[in-house]
Image (cartoon, helix red, strand yellow):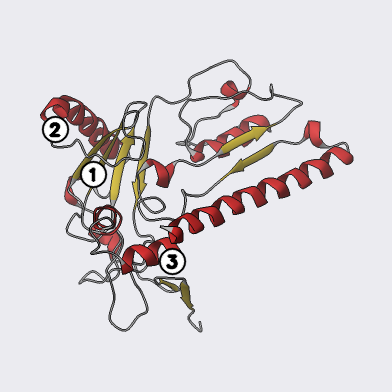
Amino acid sequence: MPDVRGDLADYFAEIERIDQEIGELLKKLTDEGLLENTMIVITGDNGMPFPHAKANLYDYGTRVPLLISFPKRFQQNVRSETFVNLIDLAPTFLDIAQVPVGHKMDGLSLVPILAGNKTRHREEVYLERERHCMCRKNELGYPGYPMRAIRTKDYLYIQNLRPERTPAGDATIPGTPSEYGDVDGGPTKAYMMEHAQDEKIKPFFTMGFEKRPPEELYDVKADPFNLNNLAQSVQHNAIRQNLKTRLNKWMQKTNDPRRNGGGDEIDRYPTYDKAWITKWSIVFLMNDH
């Protein structure tokens, strides 16, 4: 599939470009004698913008790079495999600046990890998804595709809380240019849409665009691309139930509006600026007020 390979090559070229630009910034800091006393954090806001990745809770949608450098304070060139959530950055910055936190924060400071005083930060991470783009229409308005998940070192367990909806968005929405609007436009999306009925492509189109069951379970070591759903596997029933219980307890603890089947009020929130994602691109429609 040359279209897909070319799309990936462009994506990798973008990574190479940002790497080069970061190098230029580091050189400038070095030349001005500021590098040793500058904390540098490099990360991303989502996974790669491809089907089954961005706007999903699979690993290729939620795993992002995180590089932290502060030569004056922390050891350099250390690789950590512990779980980190980006909500941990705010308390980390406050900790380094020695600013007391006067209220409860869900994030946890990374300073003990960065200073080498601890090797483990979190034993699991909890993941959420709600409305991403205005790409499906029903009686509630433009609802999202609510998902919750727990990721441990061995497994990823996902709950699709409204499995009757399409995770990629509706194929079209009358009166709009939207086409599967929760998948970024581009060559890979276009190829999959245009070849959705091809024997070799159909299974991948199904995974990326079509409806999903209420529960998904993946063995992330044996199945790093999260393709083989084990939620109905008898051999994995105890694991699924354990992760489900932990996820549900977290939803209760955090007063998640989606717990116990609720949350329709989220989908009723009004929308103002709209971004319609098409097969190839994105169309912005801005209000005049």
Q: Tag on residue 233?
A: 2
Q: Secondary structure at mark 3?
A: loop
Residue 162 image-quadrant placement: bottom left
Is residue 55 toward the left or the right of residue 14 in the image?
left
Residue position for label 1: 159
Q: The residue under label 3 is which amino acid type?
A: Gly
- Mark sitting earlier along the chain (1/3): 1
In this figure, what is the number of numbered marks? 3
Distance from Cα at disc 1 to Cα at disc 2:
16 Å
Q: Nearer the viewer, residue 235 or 160?
A: 235
Distance from Cα at disc 1 to Cα at disc 3:
26 Å
Question: Can you see residue 168?
Answer: yes
Residue position for label 3: 185
Q: The residue under label 2 is which amino acid type?
A: Ser
- Mark sitting earlier along the chain (1/2): 1
- Of all residues, the one furthest to the left in this rendering is 234
Question: Can you see residue 101?
Answer: no
